[in-house]
Amino acid sequence: MNALETRLRLMLQPWLRAPAWCIAYSGGLDSTVLLHLLASWARQEKLPPLRALHVQHGLQAAAQAWPAHCARFCQQLGVSLEVLEVSVEEGASLEQAARRARYAAFARHLQNGELLICAQHRDDQAETLLFRLLRGAGVRGLSGMPARRTLGRGQLLRPLLDSSRAELMAYARQHGLSWVEDPSNADERFSRNFLRRQVLPLLQQRWPQASTTLARSAGHCAEAQQLLGELAELDLAVARGSSSLPWLSLPSLQLSAVAALGEARQRNLLRHWLADLTRMPDSEHWAGWQNLRDARIDAEPVWQLEDGQLHRSDDRLWWLSGDWLDMPAPLRLPWIPSGGSSLLPGNGRVWLLGELPAGRWQLRYRSGGESMQLAGRGRRELKRLLNEWRVPAFVRGRLPLLFDGEELVAVANLACSARLQNRGVQLCWSPPTGAQRLSW
């Protein structure tokens, strides 16, 4: 057993009880070697079931023949193959869009507890570090590719990060393996290709261990990032606090607790908190956060980020994404007291506790000028009540309201008129939760 096989097996020992091992198999050199190594191991010992996943992007004519090549190789090894076809969104970076589509497909196909094994190696890690360094990345970016992380319902593992491309090439030649060559890898208009084909070879002429030392630096940055993450968790424990609206299950923090920290620590906290929700700007483009933090108390500032918005209300920061970014269409829904819950388009679900008396019941959203008769308080304007209940502005137009004819009798999760309160009736609303971004 050579050093490559030994390192691979040591990395995978903790995962021998996983329901299945899925191999990200492109048909290229790296994933071909990885798949061959695992299939050979499986013939010697009992391993979790192996399954190869090949993503077909449809971006170039040459790729049309790759699934057939992958199928032949998998058949030789006795490994099942699934071909996942994806659509790549147009954008400024085709590489990035293809990568997101690829990992989104992997995430969708992973079952609970399954392991996705990828073939990135030490030279890839060095290339990633250089690429991100030239883009001005911070400590998180300079940590490079993690050896392990969560992906969908399973885990992603990169067991070859301590192995070089030369080792993989030597293994492939020793075992007479064949693989496909992606023509786009020779296109030096792509920055990563330029680094791989021009910059790294030049560095290695002067410093033969360049890939090793660059990957080591990524490891140091990963350790530093871990410490920053632990500091952020300590700050989050203070900043989370409790909201006056426990039914509003959106990510939120206490603004005053965040603002009490130093500038760098604020950014560290927010990067950590929002890491799985959106891509964050670089350190030169945080004016949106400063404007949000320092706005007048009566202002309603918004910080627009790539995958959502950060709002401020009543000394809390609120993260909005998904359905929360679009106001729902006007609502006039006849309410039939039949039990169960009703789906509100783009706005969660609503249901009733208790039995309604006879009436002309209708669900609506706020349009302005509403008032409500409350037990022991007389008639109150809804606008003033919402201020009193400290309801954020971005929630007010979404609150389901129950009317009897033109009379407002219930505000979801907050209040009912005396008539309904005496009958034990409550209007309940489960708001949309927003969309969680998958961070690749």
Image (spheres, helix red, strand yellow):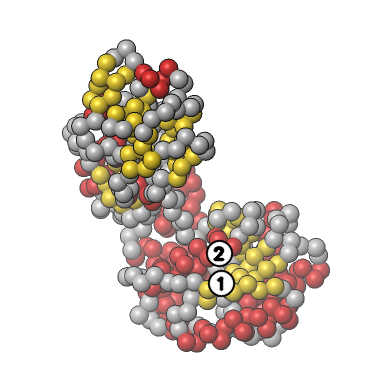
**Residue for badge 2:** 106
Q: Nearer the viewer, mark 2 or mark 1?
A: 1
Residue 398 falls in image quadrant: top left
Q: How many marks?
A: 2
Compare residues 291 and 437 and report the one nearer the observer.
437
Residue 247, given in percent of the width and then of the height, sits at 43, 32
Compare residues 258 and 231 and report the one nearer the observer.
258
Residue name at image x 46 percent, y 42 percent: 342
**Residue for badge 1:** 84
Compare residues 107 and 226 and report the one nearer the observer.
107
- Residue furthest toward the front? 358
Specify the amino acid type for callout 1. Leu
Residue 101, given in percent of the width and then of the height, sits at 47, 67
**SS label for mark 2:** helix
Q: Nearer the N terminus, badge 2 or badge 1?
A: 1
Which image quarter holds the N terminus?
bottom right
Do labels 2 and 1 touch, CB within 8 Å?
A: yes
Residue 196: tell me if it is visible.
Answer: yes
Residue name at image x 69 percent, y 60 percent: 20
Mark number displayed over residue 183: none
